[in-house]
Amino acid sequence: MLRAINGTVSTDHSIGGTLSISNGGTLGSMLSTPIINPPQSAILGVHATKDRAVVENGQVVVRPMNYLAMSYDHRIIDGREAVLGLVAMKEALEDPAPRRRPAACRPMPPARPREPGPAPWRAPASMHSPDHPAGP
């Protein structure tokens, strides 16, 4: 974080990352479909918080609503774990008190067996070269 503030961060600092966070909400974005930055395995899009009408106990009340969107590579991350992670984030945002235990930390039933799939996608080395149109 300090490197970003001081302006000394480089692309070398993001190599080996597994998850990106896109904060379009700072610009007013309400919802988007974030695109994974290879070779990372997922990206979380955090959007603007706006007051919305919701029904609670039969009454229409105004509550702050925020939208999260996650894109993930199913070859690396099982959808079940990704959704449980989103549920844990949702619960932490709804009630940030530390006494609560997020869904992702609760005991889960065993996952179904998975067939081995293809090897995870890897970005070609040429994508990380200065000559690539997207840059290093």
Image: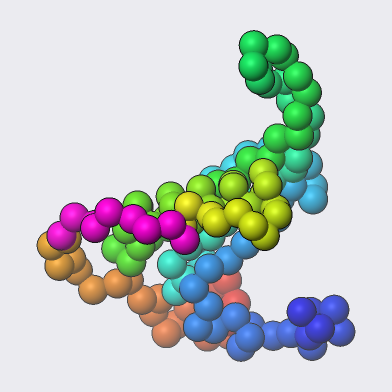
Residue 14 spot, x, y in % from top left: 60, 80
Residue located at (42% from left, 84% from top): 125
Residue 62: % across, % down: 78, 23
- The quadrant where residue 48 appears: top right
Front one among 91 and 73: 91
Q: Is residue 68 left or right of residue 103?
A: right
Q: Is residue 29 visible?
A: no
**Where, by quadrant of the figure, is residue 122 drawn?**
bottom left
Position of residue 65 relative to residue 103, above or below, is above
> In this orientation, does residue 68 appear?
yes
Q: For the stretch drawn in magenta, what is the main secondary structure?
A: loop
Quarter containing the C terminus? bottom right
Q: Which residues are magenta?
A: 105-113
Is 24 positioned to the left or the right of 76 in the image?
right
Number of marks in the rendered image: 0
Q: Identify which residue is drawn at 43% across, 50% down.
A: 83
